[in-house]
Amino acid sequence: MSKTKDLNELQEWLIKRISTSLKVKNGMDPDAPFSKYGLQSIDAVILAMEIEEEVGVELPPTLLWEYNTVNECASYLMKIGSDIAA
Amino acid sequence: MNLIATSVTKTALTEALESQLGNPNNPGNPLSFAYSQKIDETEQFPEEAIRWLYDRQLARHYVPEELGGSFRSFAELGEVIRVLSRRDVSSAVAFSTLFWSFLAWVGGTGEQKRWLAKYILERQGAMCLAYSEREHGADLAASDTVAHRTANGFEITGEKWPINRATIGGLCFVLATTDPAAGPRGLSLFMLDKGDLDPKRYSNFPKILTHGLRGSDISGIKFESCPVPAQSLLGGEGDGLQLALRGFQITRALCAAISLGAGDTALRTTLSFALNRKLYDELVIDLPHAAGVLSDAFLDLLICDCVTNAGLRSFHVVPEQSSLWASIVKYFVPTTIETMIQNLSVVLGARYYMREEHEFGTFQRVLRDAAVVSLFDGSTVVNLHALMLQFRHLARRRGVRGDQGSRLGQIFDANTAVPAWNGQRLSLVSTQANDALEGVEFSLEHLKSERAENTTDPAEIDRILAFGQKLMHEIKGHNDNFAKSEFEHGHLQSAAMFRAAQRYCALHAAASCLHAWIWNRSNSSSFFTRGAWLVPALARIFDKHLDIHHDDDVIDAARPELLEELRKLHRDNRMFSVSAAALGSN
């Protein structure tokens, strides 16, 4: 993930990442809660840990609980964006 | 660091409580089998037993020392629960709803904790956990119970069912939705004192007639726009699910102590029968089939004792791993003991089916009562699911981390002090690999390095090392499998995944037995530390739980020694456990 990622790119990356994990076939509504796509509570904590490893920045384990849509999550990652590894 | 020496006090606590309660076969004693039979047959709540327990200050074991109680270690609390459960599972379960207080010890403010401590210690308060709903069962996030903010606090509407002690008890921990749009952050946890509630705004559902725990208050509670004070919120708004999941980690492991007590009684009452009953001119215990079943049951209890002890100690040493250890213990111990009890029924024969024969019909009552443990507070399916979600990230964290030897020693060596428990270190998923599995190699090296000082027969050590190598091979296989896998999140997991999770628990059980022996064998000499049980126990786990078969000789060769110890423990009135604690005799 490049340092210069803008919000759109972050949203797309998240959609792709989460769709792969949840085997979502027909695209994700960026404003729908993740639970709509079958992401349950503990799953979400584990997925957050995996995302943390991939972006290389410490993220709260309840990331996908606190920011439980693609848009909210992407906005949060943008806010801490300057720390996100290249 | 504040260290809690548990081993010196652990047996002392058990034996003191056993002495107070006396022999359960004596109808004049509290929580006797006769009493247990009475409340089961009449389906009455065990009011006298509960009052006796409060009057003897036993509730203090659930309240931290710093708040005026005497809780210091989970292993000690487990012992108290085991002692109660071996007499009457209904009373043990009814009394032990006190363990929901850990929700407040973890998530409450100083004021809430002090209030709850007083409620328990001074007002003999009792509590229930109101999470389940008729339509949603274990799916907590799907709660239909709502809590709206008001000027003075909240207003709760919804129904909770089936709930143990919903009616007979003054306190309710209620999970309710405070923000329907916020997903997992939409739930909040309330600690409700019924004394604060308008009695017209809540009511109870009738007692549910159940297969076991017939003397219990399993009912429900309904709230209808019920105002609750703001200070009843535990943690912040939206913290409910996190707190609930962390609370379950504690109670799941403690539930195993209920199974251990029930298992001891099932074996003891069966053995009493087998030692006195003649069939075909032989005592039942001398019939090879019965002898096999009895010695297998003894192995099952020792295995489950190792798993439970280590689980309870691990909360102090590696609380970050508690989500793992708790679910493993909660799956493995109750299911193994329930199967054990079922197996024992063939030795008791027709009497197993009778409610008034042989020691107050205790066997059939324990069989029914113990069956609840694998069901409540996170069923077997819930716990296996919780484990399988973690396999991939655990496999990627495999290997040696930090001072593994020191952690293993603290978890498994009964003579080593454990650190004071820190509930703030509980984590929703484990951020560390499972020390029991990743530490097998270390413990085996430790065993080899002390070979010169071993009093154990070298051939026996070789057999133990051989099993250890097989165990490491299986653990590696599991890790290899999951490190590479594409894990599918969600609830629709395959049967193969459930089977993998069951096997994982068996690997942990085998590792727990190995570590427990290696780290305690230099402690004072006992049947446990001399170790004749270990190879048969490992063989039994491999055979029954991993489907990996060895020579029958391994277990059969050990049977005479196992039976001799079983007879000795029975004759000396000692627990069928690692500690072999002295039981109440009068």
Image (cartoon, coloured by chain):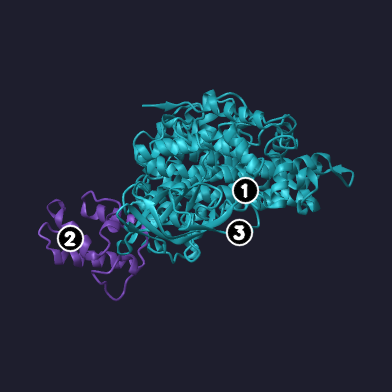
Chain colours: A purple, B cyan
Inspect the image, locate mark 3, and give the three-letter code of the amino acid beneath it: Ile
Image spot of residue B484 (x, y percent): 36, 58
The answer to which quarter of the image holds residue B375 is bottom right
Q: Marks 3 and 2, Cα distance to the nearest angstrom? A: 49 Å
Q: Is residue B426 visible?
A: yes
Q: Are marks 1 and 3 in contact (CB under 8 Å)?
A: no
Q: Give the labeled residue for mark 2.
A: A75
Question: To which chain does the residue with label 3 belong?
Answer: B
Q: Residue at x 54, y 24 (%)?
A: B8
Question: To which chain does the residue with label 1 belong?
Answer: B
Asked whether B148 or A13 is in front, the reply is: B148
Against B523, is B429 above or below?
below
Inspect the image, locate mark 1, and give the three-letter code of the amino acid beneath it: Ile
Say which mark, if any, is on residue B337. 1
**Quarter containing the C terminus of chain B:** top right
Eye-nearest disc, 1 or 2: 2
Question: To which chain does the residue with label 2 belong?
Answer: A
Inspect the image, locate mark 2, and give the three-letter code of the amino acid beneath it: Ser
Label 1 CA crowd tier, 10 Å (few <14, some 14–19, many 20+): many
Among numbered discs 1 and 3, the one appearing first in the sequence: 3
Image spot of residue B132 (x, y percent): 48, 58
For mark 3, give the secondary structure.
loop
